[in-house]
Image (cartoon, helix red, strand yellow):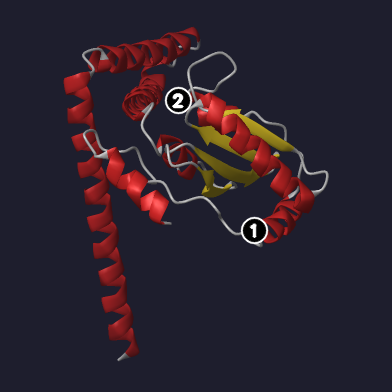
Amino acid sequence: MASKQDKEALKAAKAARKAESKAKRSQIWQAFKMQRKEDKLLIPWMLGVFLVITGAVFLLGMLFDIQWMALPVGIMFGVLGAVIVFGRRVQRNVFSKADGQPGAGAWALENLKRGWRVTPTVAATTQLDAVHRVLGRPGIVLVAEGAPHRVKTLLAQEKKRISRLVGDTPIYDMIIGNEEGQVPLAKLQSRLMKLPRNLGPKQVDVIEKRLSALASRGAALPKGPMPQGAKMRNVQRTIRRR
């Protein structure tokens, strides 16, 4: 009886993995078709990277008279290079569309890799300016989006508020934007990754517990870019009610 149940469980798990894999392939294909319509250089770039990498590996194999053995390896690396190009061009397209929309900063932060603890909208204004808090190995990073003359005040207030709890923990601040001294949305994640590692994992856990005591005073902004054509006055009315 138990053996039959185990077989059924394994069969169900195998079917679930197969369905998940099929769904992922379908999503990638849909993303490729959408990107191809908007990016006329996508296929030339992917094909060029594939041919360059494959050719380079093949020529390298010729030096050792193993070019035909090296060819399959070159093809695999060529496909990998083409996929990387595809992913980066899709990412750039997504960020370009999200740039400047309310909530885009929170959306970008919540798509960070593991190891970062993101708390969106720890402070906000009725004009949809916001400050988001990120905790990680570098320390605490306050990321603001909105009008610079308003978010600078928000940043200063939030920095003062949390500095009482975290002591000497490094606190960084960034403003999302395309002007001098600001961080473009598309470069936000890479800028965070380049910060020095000042804390150990256990220290991060301790600081997270301290910060959890702080009540989030800002009204919640949308976690993704605002759809084009959305009525901003409805969002502002919601914020005022809170």
Judge by depth and name the residue closer to the eye, 135 or 36: 135
Where is residue 100? Give x, y as percent: 38, 27
Discs 2/1, front: 1
Q: Position of residue 229 (x, y in %)?
A: 21, 34
Which residue sits at x=50%, y=12%? 64
x, y percent for residue 135: 64, 46
Pointer 1 residue: 214
Q: Which residue is mark 2?
A: 186
Residue 199, horizontal then vertical, whole percent: 76, 44
Quadrant of residue 141 in the image? top right
**Quadrant in which residue 2 is drawn:** bottom left
In what quadrant of the picture does the N terminus appear?
bottom left
Residue sitting at x 65%, y 45%: 136
Judge whether residue 140 can be spotted in this image: no
SS at mark 1 in the image: loop
39 or 221: nearer the eye?
221
Q: Quadrant of the C terminus?
A: bottom left
In the rendered image, the vertical position of residue 221 relative to residue 45, given as above or below: below
Q: Residue at x 55, y 54 (%)?
A: 217
Mark count: 2
